[in-house]
């Protein structure tokens, strides 16, 4: 099982918080950069955040910077995305992805080779 599995999505009011989890294969997780992407209905998939193999480097999209926090626990083969101050425009299907090939953090979908099925986040106004 190399495909990561997301969980933690749901319905939340504007200003609320959620924490997404990404359970990944132990064979690849600690050797992979991890990213979160999202796709809203009728829109292209977009980069949200990424973290390096050892967690030492992170990068965020401008739209979520200072509201979202990406982290990982390699001992548990699990990654996280803590989302605070949620807005209706954050409503989307959120995907976890692993990049087992590159050394540097990637911000494009093509940089990642393993993808989960997604977890829905809906923010009501």
Image (cartoon, rainbow, N blue to C red):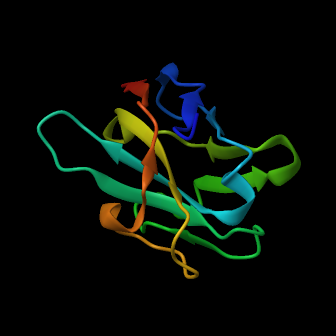
Side of 79 where 120 appears, left or right:
left
Task: Report the number of numbered marks.
Answer: 0
Side of 65 where 95 appears, left or right:
left
Q: Using the image as rendered, state which of residue 19 and residue 25 is in the foreground.
A: 25
Q: Residue at x 38, y 59 (%)?
A: 47
Q: Residue at x 67, y 44 (%)?
A: 80
The correct choice, above or below, for 98 with respect to 22 in the image is below
* Residue 16, image x, y percentages: 58, 31
Q: Residue at x 58, y 81 (%)?
A: 103
Residue most extreme to the top: 11
Q: Is residue 87 visible?
A: no
The correct choice, above or below, for 49 with respect to 19 in the image is below
* Residue 96, image x, y percentages: 50, 44
* Residue 97, image x, y percentages: 49, 50
Q: Using the image as rendered, state which of residue 25 and residue 120 is in the foreground.
A: 25
Where's the N terminus, which quadrant? top right
């Amino acid at each position: 099982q190399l495909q990561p599995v997301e969980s933690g999505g749901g319905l939340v009011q504007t200003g609320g918080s959620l924490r997404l989890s990404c359970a990944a294969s132990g064979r690849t997780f600690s050797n992979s950069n991890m990213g979160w992407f999202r796709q809203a209905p009728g829109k292209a998939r977009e980069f949200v955040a990424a973290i390096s193999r050892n967690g030492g480097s992170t990068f965020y999209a401008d739209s979520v910077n200072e509201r979202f926090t990406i982290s990982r626990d390699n001992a548990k083969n699990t990654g996280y995305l803590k989302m605070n101050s949620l807005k209706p425009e954050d409503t989307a299907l959120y995907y976890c992805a692993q990049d087992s090939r590159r050394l540097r953090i990637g911000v494009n979908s093509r940089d990642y080779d393993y993808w989960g099925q997604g977890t829905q986040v809906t923010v009501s106004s």
